Image: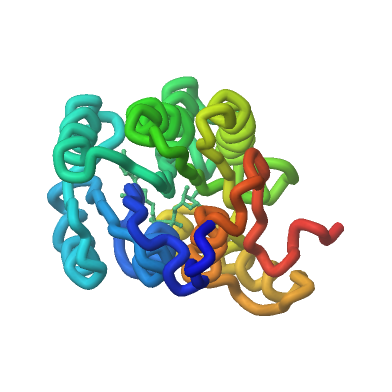
Amino acid sequence: MTETTTPHQALAGKKALIVGVANEASIAYGCAKAFKDLGADVCLTYQNDKAKPFVEPIALELGAEIFAPLDVTQADQMDALFETITQRWGKIDLLVHSIAFAPKADLQNGLLMSSAEGFAKAMDISCHSFLRLARRAVPLMSDGGCMFAMSYHGANKVVPNYNLMGPVKAALEAACRYLAYELGPKKIRVHAISPGPIQTRAASGLKEFDVLLAHSVSTAPIGEPVDVMDVGLTCAYLASPYARHLTGSTVYVDGGINIMA
Ligand code: NAD
């Protein structure tokens, strides 16, 4: 940290790739806005042509220097994205993986009944794609960096209706720890972030999400809903030099609900 660095420019000059903006309700939007507000340049992606009209205005609002398609199941799109980043920026400092998917039938019918295909797809998009992004980002993080993946409390405790996403998020959190170990010598830090329930498009795929949200507000020590800027600003702090010796942890942004019985 230089002597002149202030909290308001803590991410000045940093280049951030943020994957997972669908609209302004997205957790990834909170990350992109917080990073931008603290001085970073952002690259945003959109999943497909259907998503593009919703993400494009956000890319304009945040002055995204790179705006590109990325379906993480398409290796050629991921390669093309990193080729563009290499040419435009020549480096990445921050990577945010804020995506998840499970086929509805597999998600909503209990873990016992989840199909091998559905489970594998959920694991691929929600967990292994983080490793594929990280692998491509590491050569561009020659000055160190910071990576984030969005998890949820259902990784560690049984949350009714979270079903197969519980084991998938558990794998994601473990992946963050192992990546933190492998990448620590390169001064690349890795965090799982565990937000409390937030009303987003992905959340609407869970059965009785409104009950979960209401319960978390009534039970959490800080009895207020978490919002996407709470998550974004936490990531911004972790990305900043103020957190340079923090890595590998799961950071809860949930008003404290994870400490409750
Ligand atoms: P969201 O719907 O705004 O974002 C999910 C994103 O995943 C979308 O942008 C979608 O395009 C993307 N996505 C899905 N499949 C993809 C693919 N094949 N390729 C590229 N992108 C793909 O919802 P959100 O709640 O902001 O979700 C972001 C992350 O936060 C997820 O990992 C989710 O599990 C996690 N999370 C959400 C909550 C919550 O309550 N909303 C709580 C804890 C963790």
Q: Residue 59 or 27: which is nearer the viewer?
A: 59
Percent position of residue 245, x then y = 65, 46
Question: From the image, which quarter does the C terminus lie in?
Answer: bottom right
Is 9 left or right of 44, judged from the image as shown? right
x, y percent for residue 47: 24, 46
Q: In this view, does 40 lie above or below 151?
A: below
- Residue 33 appears in which quarter of the rendering? bottom left
Q: Which residue is drawn at 21% across and 40% down?
A: 85
Left or right of residue 205, residue 24 in this image: left
Q: In this view, does 252 lie above or below 158?
A: below
**Residue appearing at x 30%, y 64% in the figure:** 23
Instruction: Compare residues 96 and 84 and report the one nearer the observer.
Output: 84
Residue 259: x and y in percent read: 81, 58
Res. 26 in view: no
User: Residue pushed farthest front?
Assistant: 3
The residue at the far right in this view is 261
Residue drawn at (17%, 47%) of the image: 68
- Where residue 203 sits: x, y (%)? 48, 58
Left or right for 138, reference 179 = left
Residue 27 can be seen, yes or no? yes
